[in-house]
Image (cartoon, grey):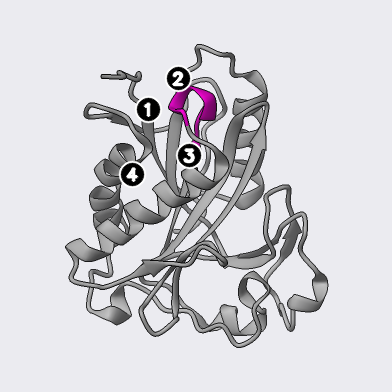
C-alpha cells in the first residue's frame, strides 16, 4: 500500500483575500520535493475574484465589493462570510494525480459531505463544481499548478448572503443559480461542515491515515481574522 505523509490541515478563520493569496504563493514557491502538503480551511470577507481566463463582461454590477484579478483558472466567482473556502496545497506527482483527477477527488469529497447531511448532489465533467440534481450550484473550483504543486481550490456555499452572485455571471454562466447547504436543510455552521469535509477530502486525495489539524502557519506572519 502506498503510504503518504499526512497533510497538515490549517483552520485559519476569516482572512483577507490578498493575504491568503500571497501566503499560498509564498508557500508554493518555497516548498521542495519533501515539503509536507497542507490544506487550508478559511473564509473571506466579501470579494469577487476573476481568474486568468476571466472576462470583465461577466462582472455585471459589483457595487462596493472589490474585484481582484488572480492567477487561478476559471472565470469570476464570489467569496464571502458563510462560505467554506478550502485551499489544497499539494504535490500532484507525490499524490499520483493529474489535475483532472484532483478536481474529481475534491468534487467527490464535497458530494460525500453533502450526502452526510441528506443533500443529493452531483458533478459535471463539462463544468467543474458540485450541483444539485436540478442544476443549482453549491460549490465552485479553481486551481493553479506551479512546478507540479497546486494552490487555490474550493469555494463551498454553506450559510452566506447569496445576493452578490446576482451581480456576476458565476463562473461565466449567465443565469446560473447558486444555492447553499443551509437552504437545502443542512447545517448553517461553516465549522461543522468543515469537520465533516476534512476526513472525506483527505481520503479522496489518497492519504492513508488521520491528518493533524492545527492553526496558523508558523513560517509566515499570522493571517488576521477579518470577518468579525
Quadrant of residue 136 in the image? bottom left
Q: Position of residue 28 (x, y in %)?
A: 62, 27
* In this view, the mark in front (2 or 4): 4
Q: Which residue lies under the disc numbered 2?
A: 36
Is disc 4 placed on a helix, strand or loop?
helix
Q: Residue at x 49, y 49 (%)?
A: 103
Q: Position of residue 6 (x, y in %)?
A: 33, 24
Q: Which residue lies under the disc numbered 4?
A: 201
Task: Indicate whether 156 appears above or below 205.
Answer: below
Q: Which residues are magenta?
A: 87-96
* In this view, the mark in front (1 or 4): 4
Mark 2 touching mark 4, by CB under 8 A? no
Q: Which residue lies under the disc numbered 1?
A: 7
Query: Is residue 136 within the magenta segment?
Result: no
Q: Which residue lies under the disc numbered 3?
A: 88
Is disc 2 placed on a helix, strand or loop?
loop
Q: Badge 3 local density, few (<14 within 10 Å), some, or many (20+)? A: many
Mark 4 touching mark 3, by CB under 8 A? yes
Q: Position of residue 228 (x, y in %)?
A: 44, 58
Q: CA distance from mark 3 to mark 2?
A: 12 Å
Q: In the visual, does 80 lie left or right of 189?
A: right
Q: Earlier in the sequence, mark 4 or mark 3?
A: 3
Q: CA distance from mark 1 to mark 4?
A: 11 Å
Mark 1 touching mark 3, by CB under 8 A? yes
Is disc 1 placed on a helix, strand or loop?
loop
10 or 119, nearer to the observer: 119
Task: Indicate whether 88 appears above or below 26.
Answer: below
Amino acid at each position: 500500500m502506498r503510504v503518504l505523509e499526512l497533510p497538515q490541515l490549517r483552520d485559519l478563520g476569516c482572512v483577507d483575500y490578498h493575504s491568503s493569496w500571497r501566503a499560498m504563493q509564498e508557500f508554493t514557491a518555497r516548498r521542495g520535493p519533501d515539503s509536507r502538503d497542507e490544506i487550508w480551511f478559511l473564509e473571506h470577507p466579501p470579494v469577487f475574484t476573476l481568474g486568468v481566463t476571466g472576462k470583465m463582461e461577466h462582472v455585471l454590477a459589483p457595487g462596493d465589493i472589490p474585484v481582484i484579478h488572480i492567477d487561478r483558472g476559471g472565470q469570476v466567482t464570489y467569496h464571502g462570510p458563510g462560505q467554506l473556502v478550502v485551499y489544497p496545497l499539494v504535490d500532484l506527482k507525490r499524490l499520483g494525480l493529474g489535475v483532472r483527477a484532483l478536481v474529481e477527488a475534491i468534487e467527490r469529497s464535497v458530494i460525500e459531505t453533502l450526502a452526510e447531511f441528506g443533500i443529493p448532489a452531483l458533478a459535471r465533467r463539462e463544468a467543474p463544481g458540485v450541483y444539485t440534481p436540478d442544476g443549482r450550484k453549491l460549490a465552485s473550483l479553481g486551481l493553479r499548478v506551479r512546478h507540479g504543486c497546486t494552490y487555490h481550490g474550493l469555494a463551498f456555499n454553506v450559510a452566506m448572503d447569496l445576493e452578490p452572485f446576482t451581480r456576476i455571471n458565476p463562473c461565466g454562466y449567465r443565469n446560473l443559480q447558486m444555492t447553499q447547504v443551509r437552504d437545502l436543510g443542512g447545517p448553517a455552521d461553516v465549522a461543522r461542515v468543515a469537520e465533516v469535509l476534512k476526513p472525506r477530502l483527505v481520503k479522496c486525495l489518497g492519504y492513508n491515515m488521520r491528518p493533524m489539524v492545527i492553526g496558523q502557519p508558523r513560517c509566515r506572519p499570522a493571517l488576521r481574522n477579518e470577518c468579525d
